[in-house]
C-alpha cells in the first residue's frame, strides 16, 4: 500500500514493517510524516496496525504523535479499524490521555 503525505509519496517501508509486525522497524520509521500519512481510502498506519492486531505498534505510533481521531474516507477512525485480537483500550486509552492534557 502506497501512502502519501499530501502529494508526497512516503513509500512502503512503515506499512511493510506494520504488516510484518516489526515494532522495532516501525519505531525507527515513525515520524510525523509517516504516522499521519494516508493510503488508499484514507487509511493511516494507526488504522492498519490495530486491524492486524499489533497493539505494541499502535503504542509506538501513538508515542510518535499519530492522530487517533483522523478519519478515513468513510469517516472511521483507528478505533473502528481495531481487530478482535487488539484490545480497543490501546487506542481509546491514549485518546483519553490526550484529552486530559488539553
Image (cartoon, grey):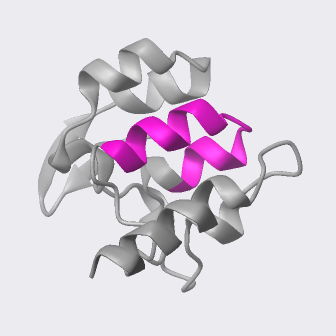
Q: Position of residue 10 (x, y in %)?
A: 20, 39
Residue 7 lies in magenta, yes or no? Answer: no
In the depicted view, which residue is nearer to us: 94 or 47? Answer: 94
Outermost front residue: 100
- In the image: residue 32, left or right of residue 65: left
Q: Quadrant of residue 60 in the image?
A: top left
Q: Measuring 69% from the left and 70% from the top, which residue is drawn there?
A: 80
Q: Quadrant of residue 11 in the image?
A: top left
- Magenta residues? 47-63
Residue 53 lies in magenta, yes or no? Answer: yes
Is 75 rendered above or below residue 10? below
Is 100 rendered above or below residue 61? below
Q: Point out the image quarter for the C terminus.
A: bottom left
- In the image: residue 5, left or right of residue 66: left
Q: Measuring 19% from the left and 39% from the top, which residue is drawn there?
A: 31
Q: Quadrant of residue 66 in the image?
A: bottom left
Q: How many marks?
A: 0
Magenta span main SS = helix
Q: Measuring 59% from the left and 59% from the top, which residue is drawn there?
A: 91
Q: Position of residue 9 (x, y in %)?
A: 18, 44
- In the image: residue 73, left or right of residue 48: left
- In the image: residue 67, left or right of residue 69: left
In the depicted view, which residue is nearer to us: 31 or 39? Answer: 31
Q: Position of residue 67 (x, y in %)?
A: 35, 65
Q: Measuring 70% from the left and 59% from the top, which residue is drawn there?
A: 89
Amino acid at each position: 500500500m502506497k501512502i502519501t503525505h499530501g502529494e508526497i509519496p512516503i513509500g512502503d517501508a512503515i506499512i511493510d514493517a506494520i504488516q510484518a509486525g516489526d515494532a522495532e522497524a516501525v519505531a525507527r520509521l515513525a515520524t510525523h510524516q509517516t504516522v499521519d500519512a494516508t493510503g488508499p481510502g484514507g487509511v493511516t498506519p494507526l488504522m492498519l496496525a490495530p486491524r492486524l492486531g499489533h497493539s505494541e505498534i499502535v503504542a509506538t505510533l501513538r508515542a510518535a504523535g499519530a492522530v487517533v481521531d483522523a478519519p478515513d474516507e468513510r469517516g472511521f477512525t483507528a478505533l473502528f479499524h481495531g481487530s478482535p485480537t487488539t484490545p480497543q483500550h490501546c487506542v481509546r486509552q491514549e485518546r483519553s490521555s490526550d484529552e486530559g492534557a488539553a
